[in-house]
Image: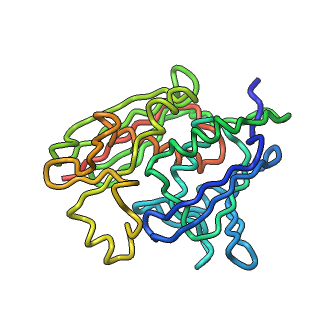
Amino acid sequence: MALQQTISKPIEFSGVGVHSGQKATVRLLPAPENHGVVFVRTDLEPPAVIPGTSSNTSSASLATTLGCEPGRSVATVEHLLAALVGIGVDNLRVEVDGKELPILDGSAEPYAKELVTTGLQVQNQPRRYLIVRRKVQVQDGQCWASIEPSNTGGLTIECSLDFEHPVIGKINHTVHITPLTFLESIAPARTFGFLKDAEALQSRNLALGASMHNTVLLDGDSVVNEEGLRFPDEFVRHKILDTMGDLSLLGLPVIGHGLFHELRE
């Protein structure tokens, strides 16, 4: 029987938000059994306490934002949430002194590696799961997502992208999530964006903190970053990372097989 886990001691990260461009510090603190993942905006008075669940999701456009009260939300939570589910953290208090979590290097690797280095504390209550019993599918234009019962147990994610950009094209990746597969093949994958979109995004006060230190940047036919890609299919691996973070908002680890497809012309 698997038991719930939290972290063994506090962890702290600092950096800029990819959309706000504002500096923020996030502190991860151990939490008791059955607490779940709860975000706390410590820069507000009184502090905003925001459970990391789907019912508190206020936006999922370009980044996942939690908190339904005006001015009392926290944005870009998906990379941290992916690291928590990938490494196996059930209970955590997340304190942040700004409206957006730091983007760090654009992946979940800094979070995941520090969680492993710090170590987890096994707790006394059994871990509960959300077990998918029948297929569910949703569609938005030419993009769709489905989740169905797992043949292997645990969580498997299969994702495909079909982009006109020559560096991306048609790619797919499938992974059965374990702490090891997450650390090695999903956590390092960085967020990506297109140079042609930068001006329009910034005119909407988005991507103000984006740079080649935290984003894979694509121009008309190539990757702009000098170091190139971490994986040939880094783009689809990052979509899996984001998907893991968003699935965690169901509030329990998922046992199922997820399939996701995104087409962009």
Residue at x 49%, y 54% (from the top left corner): 104
Residue at x 68%, y 64% (from the top left corner): 50
Q: Quadrant of the N terminus?
A: top right
Q: Quadrant of residue 49?
A: bottom right
23 over 102 or under it: above or below: below
How many numbered callouts? 0
Residue at x 18%, y 55% (from the top left corner): 219
Q: Report the colour scheme.
A: rainbow
222 or 242, nearer to the observer: 222
Q: Where residue 109 sits in the image (x, y, percent)? A: 51, 42
Q: Is residue 112 left or right of residue 206?
A: right
Q: Where residue 146 sits in the image (x, y, percent)? A: 43, 40
Check the image and name the residue furthest to the top.
152
40 or 214, nearer to the observer: 214
125 over 45 or under it: above or below: above
Q: Is residue 229 left or right of residue 41?
A: left
102 or 51, nearer to the observer: 102
Q: Is residue 56 left or right of residue 237?
A: right
Check the image and name the residue furthest to the front.
226
Q: Is residue 152 left or right of residue 93?
A: left
Q: Where residue 197 sits in the image (x, y, percent)? A: 25, 65
Q: Where residue 117 sits in the image (x, y, percent)? A: 65, 36
Q: Quadrant of residue 94?
A: bottom right
Check the image and name the residue furthest to the right.
124
Residue at x 45%, y 70% (from the top left corner): 21
34 over 25 or under it: above or below: above
